[in-house]
Image (spheres, rainbow, N blue to C red):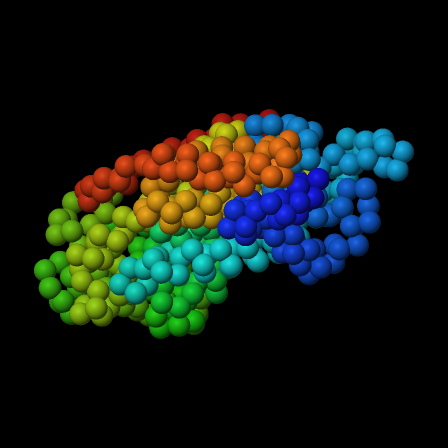
Amino acid sequence: MLSNWLIDTELFAAPEDLSVFQKELPMEWIEQALDETNKASMRRRKLPAELVVWLVVGLGLYRNRPISEVVSKLDLTLTNKLGESVAPSAVPQARERLTAKPLKALFNLTSEHWCQREDANDRWNGLELFSIDGTTLRCTDGKETSEHFGHISNQKTKKSVYPVARLCALMSLRSRMIRDVRFGPCSSGEITYARQLKDSVPSDSLTIFDNCYISAKLMTDWQKKDKNIHWMTPIKSNTNYKVLETYGDNDFLVEMTVSRDAKKQHPDLPKTWQARLTTYGERKESTHIIGVVSSLTDAKKYSAEDILSVYFERWEIENGYGEIKQYQLDENILLRSKTVEGIYQEIWGILIAYNLIRVEISQIAKEADVSPLRISFVMAMRYIQDELMWCAIATPGSIPKKLRAMRENVKQFILPEKRKRPKDRTVRVSKTRYPIKTRSS
C-alpha cells in the first residue's frame, strides 16, 4: 500500500526528502477527519476508510483514468485472507459508506494549515489578498441530481442539458490556494454562497470581487467581523453615487443609496452606504468599467495608484479555475459521480488535490526564489502524478533521489513574468457555454 511505502521511506530519507503526500497530507490528518465525522469504524473493512479517502483525492489527480486504474496506481488493491482481490463493486460501496463529510473535514483542516503557512509573508500594503468568484460544474443527468442541483435556465422555455452545481471559492491571489469554498444547487446565486464565506476571511485582508457582487448587504456585512477586513469591486459608469469628499484627481469618498429591493429583503440596511471610488479618469459607455469602489478609505495609507493596480490581481482566481477545469479535470465536462452525495464527495476530493498541487508549487517557488504564479501548474501536476507511480513501483531507497530530481526538473519550467492587463476594459455580452434543451424535452 502507498502508506507502507511512505513509512518504509523514512528509513532511507531525511524529513525534507519525503514525499509531498506524506509530508503535506499526513495520515494523521486523514484519521482526524474520519474521527471528527464518526467514520473511523470503517477501518476494519476490506477497504479501510483511510484508503478510500486517498482514492477520492487520487480521482482528482487522475481525471482521465478509470477508477479501477486509479486504484491500481495508488496501490490500493487489497486481498482477503485467501489472497482473493477485493471485488470491483467494493470501491463504489466503500465511497458510499464514507460519504462526503470526511472529505469536507479534511479540506477544512488542510486548507487552514496550508494557507496560513504559504500566504503569511506575501502581502499588499500589510494586507493578505483574496478574491471571491463563482464557477459551475456539470453533473451526470439523473432524477436525483436534477432535483437537487437543478438546471440553469437560459430562456423561458430552455434549460441546460445537465444538472449544474454552483461553486463559490475564497482564493488567495498570491498563491492561488483555495482557503474556503461553498457549493451546491445552482438555484442559489453566487452572492448567496459568497455571504457564507465572510467568516473565513482573516483580519488584515483585502478581498476583491467581480462587478456582479456589488451589494450593499454583502459589502457592509464584510467588515462587521473586523474593521481591518476590506473589500473591493469594480464599478460601471451607470452606477449612481454622490461625491462626499475629494481625495485627489479621480479619487473620492462617495455615498450610494440602498435600493428598495435590497431594503425590503434586508430591513436592517441603512438608507445609504459609503465607499471610496477610484476611477481611471475616463467616462465611457454604460458597459465600461470606470474604476473600483472599496472600503480602503484611508487615502494616506492606500494610494489611488496602488488601488487601481491591485485590482487586476483579481484575475488570478479566474486562472485558478482554469487550472482546475482545463488541466486537472482534463476539460471533461461531467463529474464522475452519479449520486448527489458522490458529487459532493468528488468535488471535495478535487479541491484537496488542487490545493496539494499548489502547495508543492509554493515549495518549488521558494527554492527557485520566484512567485508561485510563475511555476507551471501542468508540469507540477504531472510530476506529482509520476510521484505516485514511483511510490508504487520503486524501491523505497530510490524515492528520495527521484523526488529531488523532480524538484530540479520542475524549476526548468518557470514561466516568464506576465504582462499587466490593460486598464481599458469592457464587459462582454453574456453568452452561455452550456448546451440547452426545452423544458418539455
Res 260 quadrant in image: bottom left
Measured as percent of width and height from the top left, residue 289 is found at: 23, 47
Measured as percent of width and height from the top left, residue 280 is found at: 16, 51
Using the rendered image of the protein, determine whether residue 435 is visible from the camera's viewpoint: yes
Res 119 quadrant in image: bottom left
Question: What residue lies at 52% left-to-right and 38% top-to-bottom?
Answer: 401
Question: What residue lies at 32% left-to-right and 48% top-to-bottom?
Answer: 369
Question: What residue lies at 49% left-to-right and 32% top-to-bottom?
Answer: 382
Is residue 185 left or right of 379 when viewed as pictured?
right
Specify the farthest residue to the right: 82
Is residue 256 left or right of 144 when viewed as pictured?
left
- In front of the other: 155 or 391: 391
Is 172 located above or below residue 156 in the figure?
below
Specify the farthest residue to the left: 249
Is residue 71 left or right of 205 when viewed as pictured?
right
Q: Name the quadrant of the N terminus.
A: top right
- In front of the other: 201 or 58: 58
Measured as percent of width and height from the top left, residue 304 is found at: 17, 60
Q: Name the quadrant of the C terminus.
A: top right
Measured as percent of width and height from the top left, residue 79 is found at: 82, 35
Is 360 located above or below residue 294 in the figure?
above
Using the rendered image of the protein, determine whether residue 101 is visible from the camera's viewpoint: no
Question: What residue lies at 48% left-to-right and 62% top-to-bottom?
Answer: 200
- In front of the other: 290 or 111: 111
Total number of numbered labels? 0
- In front of the other: 122 or 436: 122
